[in-house]
Image (cartoon, grey):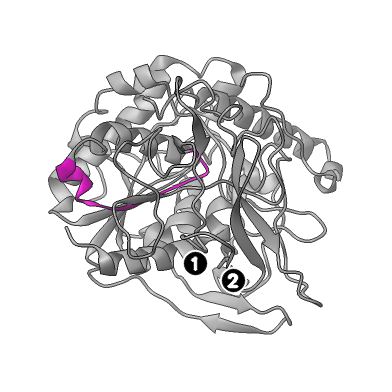
Amino acid sequence: MIGRCRHWWTSVLSGRGAVRRRVRQVILAGIALCVIAVAGISCGDSSSSPAASPAASASPAGTASPAGTASPAASASPAGTASAAATASPSAGSANTVWLCRPGLPDNPCESSLETTVVSADGTSTVESAAPAENPPIDCFYVYPTVSGQTTQNANQEIDPELRAIAIQQASRFSQVCQVYAPVYRQMTLSAINSGTGDTEAARALAYGDVLSAWEDYLANYNQGRGVVFIGHSQGTFMLTHLIATEIDADPDLRRLLVSALLIGGNVLVAAGEDVGGDFQNIPACRSADQTGCVVAYSSFDREPSPDASFGRADTGPKANELSGGNLQVLCVNPASLSGGTGPLQPYFGTAKFPGPLGLVLPAPPSVPTPWVASPGLYTAHCESAGDATWLQVDTTGIAGDQRQVVFQTLGPGWGLHLFDVNLALGNLVELVRQQEAAYSP
């Protein structure tokens, strides 16, 4: 894995000045090292504390234009070794949990406006209204990817603007179908990993310990026997994969609480040709909308992953050396067609400029009057395998005269559409949870 974590920025971003070039270099170097660091995690009232801003890489606000500007939604990041995560203790008990999102919090980013400008292929638009559900019967437990650039080894527990932005971008639309709980956790920072000092057992244990402690807090104080949907992307997926594998997979009582796990952009492993095995022994892939207690996982690309891809390949990705002695592959579940085949994606992207250093390199968001923009009919997706790669193939529909913005491989062929994994299928994922909620029986 080390030495294979290479990536390229598209040429369109190359001419924006020395400051922006330097920002890109730092972000990309940190992302690469974050993915190396992740290589073992899955084998292994507002709080009185300040809240955390995790550390590290791309995360988004809009979409990319056909000419080549991009605006991601999240990125790869560290997570921890099996030994470190297995020995991690809760961060300090439930009293110290910092909630980024939780029912009843003032100014809750996961209950933000969902008003959306829906842009059709012919350029016409309408406004779509939606709102958080009142007293939904299930909860969502969301763990975010790396999004900020603090300069310490682990991020602190302050809720920086980047945290609020990513919660809005990835988790807030799920408020239509569940109560969203999102803990702040002290993940390793871009700065520390880029300097070579951040990838330590203690740093990994601290990050995972916060997630574990928050889960225990949630179970003890908020769950009350309600079904749960886990939602993660990138580092969040690595954290949740380990949590589910060690705390839930072998426990029938806790498995009964599992509505589903949306583990996006994190190389969930299964036995080759199977829907279970690898990371989980008792939790299979979701293959129908009325199936519960199952997993949706994928990494999106617009072409076959490169031989050194960070995602989609079990032998070269961040978990390449994690599980040995088995014939494993990366799980792909198409959120647009769970049973297989091709289906239409329902992309939703936020339109606010993303805060922090990433704002220096991300393009201007789409110019619409609402917090969200949707582009129905722009993409289709299907799971594809070639050689030892398995990925979600995303294609544009190529409608004549369609001038809507499209995404592209912002970080190069080794990363594919990783930064857009969640938002490309956000409408599909929310609708899936809605149907699973109706089917769920404890």
In this view, the residue farthest toward the front is 273
Q: Callout 1, which amino acid?
A: Gly
In the displayed structure image, the side of residue 13 where residue 161 appears, left or right? left
Figure quadrant of residue 2: top right
- What SS does tag 1 mark? helix
Q: Is residue 103 visible?
A: no
**Residue 236 got which mark?**
none
Figure quadrant of residue 394: bottom right
Residue, x 59% and y 34% (percent of image)? Answer: 313
Q: Is residue 167 depicted above or below 357 in this figure?
A: below
The magenta span reads 252-267
**Residue 427 got which mark?**
1
Q: Nearer the viewer, residue 240 or 161?
A: 240
**Residue 163 location, x and y as percent?**
46, 47
Q: Is residue 18 visible?
A: yes
Residue bearing the label numbered 2: 374
Residue, x 52% and y 36% (percent of image)? Answer: 329
Earlier residue among tags 1 and 2: 2
Q: Nearer the viewer, residue 83 or 117?
A: 83
> Does the segment drawn in magenta span residue 262?
yes
Q: Callout 2, which amino acid?
A: Ala
Residue, x 42% and y 68% (percent of image)? Answer: 431
In the displayed structure image, the side of residue 1 where residue 442 appears, left or right? left
Q: Residues within 10 Å of mark 1 (few under 14, many from 20)?
A: many
